[in-house]
Amino acid sequence: MRSHYSLSLFLLLLLLSAPNRSFAVEPYQQIKDIEYATADHQRLLLDLYLPKSKQPPLVVWIHGGAWRAGSKANMPLINLVKNGFAVASVDYRLSPVAKFPAQIHDIKAAIRFLRGSAEKYGYNADKIGILGSSAGGHLVALTGVTNGNQQLEGDLGDFNDQSSSVQAIVDYFGPTNFMTILPQSTPHGLSVRIPALELLLGDRPEKKPDLARLASPVFHVDEQDPPLLIIHGDQDPQVPINQSHELQGKYEQHQRDVTFKVIHGGAHGGPEFFDAERMQLVEEFLRKHLTM
């Protein structure tokens, strides 16, 4: 009898100490390392965060890192997940591995995959929002303003029957015009941007003007582009705030929906970009354009 009691107690303690990943404990489910495509024998992966709610709206996060570093693991939108959004955090080929436009081909393949997998994972992909910071901000803006652009679509993955279009863009301090960013930059900015752009494009932008324009969101804006929210610090030492002003101006020129939130005193990222005030702004923007 005593032995039976001890065994029962041991099993109970074992159950209590085991990690529980169910929705009963966690406010969301995380599924890591989902393969969305392969390119040059490299597996392209994303992480998916799913809230409790049924058929949540879907947003895609694209990390920064000067196009040459960074990871999908650094995903700052957990509060959106807790408030009912599904979030896919996407890795893409970095510039030491592949030159532009590989990065956009990867991201558009991820969006096609996510649309084609909506029923499997249980989110709503009729409308998709895309968010990113720094180099990721550049990539989300370019993705959003090139809906339907076959030159940047690529053919990666198994869901080429799906659309890679997005319906809302949140650009955190991303470069938007590779033809003007270097003249606008501080000496510190030049020390970061010149090697990063040379690695991404294969040379300085003025040496590859056609490729630099293809990679610049401002040259693609037209009357069909989705709503855009830009968040940028006015003391950014790496990406001049004029880059965001240029994209805002193009949107206004084409009478598109654009909101520009300046963080006064803000540098190149930091917690203030994802504080309660800014996250409320982002959430309201996404709900307006993805769920209404």
Image (cartoon, rainbow, N blue to C red):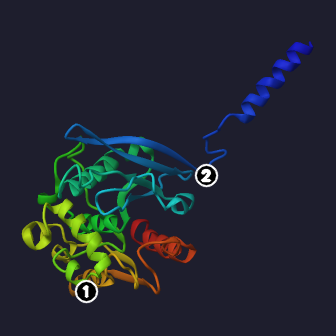
Q: Is residue 276 above or below residue 160?
A: below
Q: Quadrant of the C terminus?
A: bottom left
**Residue 115 percent across, percent down from the top left:** 32, 50
Viewer-closest of 122 and 99? 99
State the image quarter where residue 261 is shown: bottom left
Viewer-closest of 211 and 30? 211
Q: Residue at x 33, y 81 (%)?
A: 258
The amino acid pointed to by label 2 is: Pro
Q: Residue 13 — which label? A: none
Q: Residue 27 — which label? A: 2
| Whether residue 167 is visible | no
Q: Residue at x 24, y 84 (%)?
A: 184
Q: Quadrant of the N terminus?
A: top right
Q: Residue at x 57, y 58 (%)?
A: 82
Q: Residue 249 — which label? A: 1
Q: Answer left or right for 1 relative to 146.
A: right
State the image quarter where residue 260 is shown: bottom left
Q: Residue furthest right?
A: 2
Viewer-closest of 115 and 270? 270
